[in-house]
Amino acid sequence: MKRWEDKSWTRAMRIMLDFSGMMADAVGHRHGLTVEQVNSMEHAFEAVHKHLKQQRRAGHLPFYELPYDDETLKVVLKAARKVVKRCENFVVLGIGGSALGGIALFRALRHPHHNLMPQAKRKGLPRVFFADNIDPEGFSALLNIVNLEKTVFNVISKSGGTAETMSQFLIVRNKLIRKLGRKRHTAHIIATTDPERGYLRAIAREQGYETLPIHPGVGGRFSVLSPVGLLPAAVAGIDIEELLAGARNADKTCKQGRLWKNPAGMNAALQVLAYTVKKKPISVMMPYSDALRDVADWYRQIWAESLGKRVDLRGRVVHVGPTPVKALGVTDQHSQLQLYMEGPFDKVITFLTVEKFRKTIKIPASFSHMDGIGYLGRHTLNALIQAEGEATRSALTQARRIHTVIKLPEINPFTVGQLLFLLEVQTLYAGGLLGINPLDQPGVEAGKQLTYGMMGRKGFEDRAQMIALKPQGIKRYRIAV
Ligand code: PA5
């Protein structure tokens, strides 16, 4: 029996939303919310919930079904087994939603120095890299350290035409062909893309690359539980079955139609109230865990791209959207906290905490004659990080700063699956409550089209004209250093 099939284990592994720090009882009425204010969102929540339920039933929200897709799971596991058998390095080429989910999973659920460990210590698993930028220095440095003969490149692009990813692909393909020849190079590329459409799909068909599908209705930032995130995770040795079981578990509670029973709905309502009623335009996510730091990066994208919109559902210009910021506990206590404590009252903070870390490390008792150092020796780093987190939250409460806490009993695929699914559903609810479409990204598409125009892609010439690199008649203000 898998451990997620054991009811008492899954009960013990449930993550918890604690929003005491959002309430007027804790921080006063000026910044905190009253129960009446939270209740005032009930009708709007129920309407959004009903709409999403209908959309889901009609098959318009396929990301909801990813945790139940056993067929894709089998295909991914098979592909991962093949990769693990024959390669030393697995390199993901992708950007935005095609990279951030995989990065978050890898950081949360693998050894933090997985790639630095000798192969035997990695249990024969490949090193896993994510190339999510096109900085020529960064990309060439990565290509310099992987032996192409022992490397598989996973090109991930839903649209199959994103300039950054396709440029990386063209560079890699060229190198592979030069080194291994036209025939052999195909075994070193796996394309994850739309099942039918797009250039990458067409190229994969023509070249004979192995492919994995991204459901046409699943957008990049909602694709972490599709082959986009699952293949890199499985190659890295992460138990993706447990991850999906965690997401299914979260789905059960996120299906609840009552606001006070639905953690995704409640957190969305709290965030929207903080943004609209309490005028907090900045939404910080601050994990007290190195392993969860890239979950905050992933959240930054899903929150920003989903909620940052020019028009609402009725077509009115609204320019809406909270600004997501990531911070890391305890590191950023020494960088950001001063601002959060004493700066403007413009933030709502979501803390991610871990009750039981996977390691315990004792601080040795030394210099006991020095009061300012000796006290540390009676403790563990675990106790220190917990104490600092609690002290920070309590100090913020005293300074009347609002915050929620998402508590993970421990970090494992089951809890991370719950967390990611919760945040995805929360984003949909928040979009509904703000009256915008959280599933499109016209701003990102516009940026892509301007790039195509500037790089001379046929059909996008007019876009190039919109950007004049040396605008005529516009005065420049510059100072050289
Ligand atoms: O979430 C999104 O839709 C975007 O961030 C995309 O994932 C990103 O632009 C990459 O697109 P694609 O997967 O089509 O290459």
Image: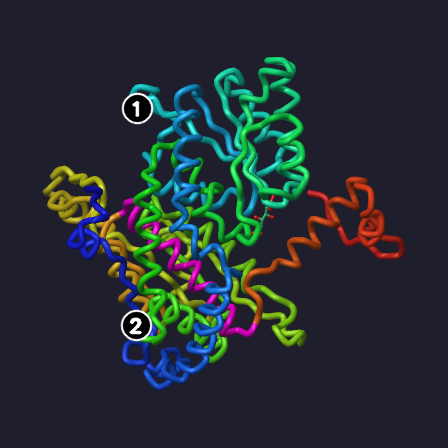
State which tag comes first along the sequence, 1 or 2: 1
The quarter of the rendered structure image containing the N terminus is: top left
Work out which residue is located at the far right of the displayed protein and give it: 473
| Type of amino acid under label 2 | Lys
Q: How far apart are marks 1 and 2 (CA)?
A: 42 Å
Q: Is mark 2 on a helix, strand or loop?
A: helix
Residue 336 is drawn in which quadrant?
bottom left
| Type of amino acid under label 1 | Lys
The residue where tag 2 is placed is 261
Q: Taking the image as drawn, is residue 76 in sight?
A: yes
In the image, is 459 to the left or to the right of 392? right
Q: What element carries label 1?
A: loop
Q: Which of 257 and 323 is in front in this view?
A: 257
Q: Position of residue 33 (x, y in %)?
A: 36, 80
Q: Nearer the viewer, residue 56 or 476?
A: 56
The residue where tag 1 is placed is 123
> Which mark is nearer the camera, 1 or 2?
2
Magenta stretch, residue numbers: 411-435
In reply to whether residue 373 is colored magenta, the answer given is no
In the image, is 197 to the left or to the right of 191? right
